[in-house]
Amino acid sequence: MIPATAPDSVRIRVGTVPFNVTTLPDAVTRVIRAAIKSEPISIRFSNAYCVALASQDSEYQSLLNGPGLNFPDGTPVAWFMKKNAHKKGFIFGRVRGPSLFTETLNAGRKDNVGHFFLGTTQETLENLEAAVADRFPGTRISGRFAPPFAPLDEDFYRDCAARVAATDAQLIWVALGTPKQDFVAVELAKRVGRPCAAVGAAFDFVAGTAKEAPVWMQNSGTEWVYRLATEPRRLWRRYLLGNIQFLRSAMTESA
């Protein structure tokens, strides 16, 4: 078997979404390299919901098929990738967004990577910064910004880009919810000339404002059950209806 050490080089499609074949350690290395070299790329951690949404939203599908990295965040996505990845002789694994977030914060200390946190609320960002300082002492946090709820228009992008540009940040983390954060990561990377990674609930998990599923649920493909149980009113449509659409797309449109 061949280790997938070059996340940019091999992709396997699940539904209409092409996923980069890699492992979590290799993905961390790739993200840090992008930060050090100031690569203006967007990084997505796509799961079953993203595949389901892309099958129904042509604009989002186009984004995920465009420039950038799509890492397989969800275990169900990794299951569908497994057959083709092994057939082609590649070793790969799930690249869970919150896990890559913490692993990159940890590993990035060696190169003094500067991080910018964009999203959620001011309170969460304050808790996040304190938690990062406690868990990963020496991490360089170059800036943070919790933008007000607003449409993705020129004013929004100009404001966010100006705040990032005013710092020495090398890597921008975006937590604004799917799919909004993926559109922001693409546009912001272009404007600031630095990598932008859309990491969803990672801020809340590290800040302690939301609880992560037990590791066994993360590894078994049932993490969505835990999240649904904790936020049923917000997430029932995403998971119950989205999972049906994901299976339909993955089984009929995968390559």
Image (tube, rainbow, N blue to C red):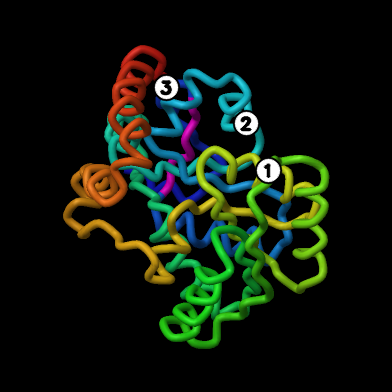
The image quadrant where one finds the C terminus is top left
* Disc 3 to disc 1, C-alpha distance: 21 Å
The residue labelled by disc 3 is: 15
Q: Are marks 1 and 2 in contact (CB under 8 Å)?
A: yes
Identify whether 116 is placed above or below 10: below
Q: Residue at x 81, y 64 (%)?
A: 165
In depth, the one of 82 and 253 nearer the eye is 253
Give yes or no for residue 90 being in the magenta stretch: no
Disc 1 element: helix
User: Which is nearer the N-term, disc 1 or disc 2?
Assistant: 2
Residue 217 vertical placement versus 122 (above, below): above
* Outermost front residue: 233
Q: Answer with left or right where residue 19 lies relative to residue 187.
A: left
Give the residue displayed 59% in from the left and 58% down from the top.
119
Q: Residue at x 31, y 35 (%)?
A: 236
Residue 21 lies, in percent from the top left, at 44, 41
Q: Is residue 89 left or right of residue 112?
A: left
Q: Is mark 3 in CB contact (under 8 Å) with mark 1?
A: no
Q: Which residue is mark 2?
A: 63
Instruction: State which quarter of the image contains the N terminus.
Output: top left
Find disc 1 in the rendering and name its residue: 186
Where residue 59 appears, as percent x and y from the top left, is: 63, 24
Between the C-alphas of marks 3 and 2, the distance is 14 Å
Query: 10 Å neighbourhood of mark 2: few (<14), some, or many (≥20)?
Result: some
Report the span colored magenta.
17-22
- Mark 3 and mark 2 lie on one chain; the one further toward the N terminus is 3
Instruction: Look at label 3 and name its amino acid.
Output: Gly
Q: In what element is the residue under mark 2?
A: helix
Decide: few, some or many residues near mark 1? Use Cα within 10 Å; few <14, some 14-19, many ≥20.
many
Point out residue 241 in the picture as x, y percentages from the top left corner.
32, 25
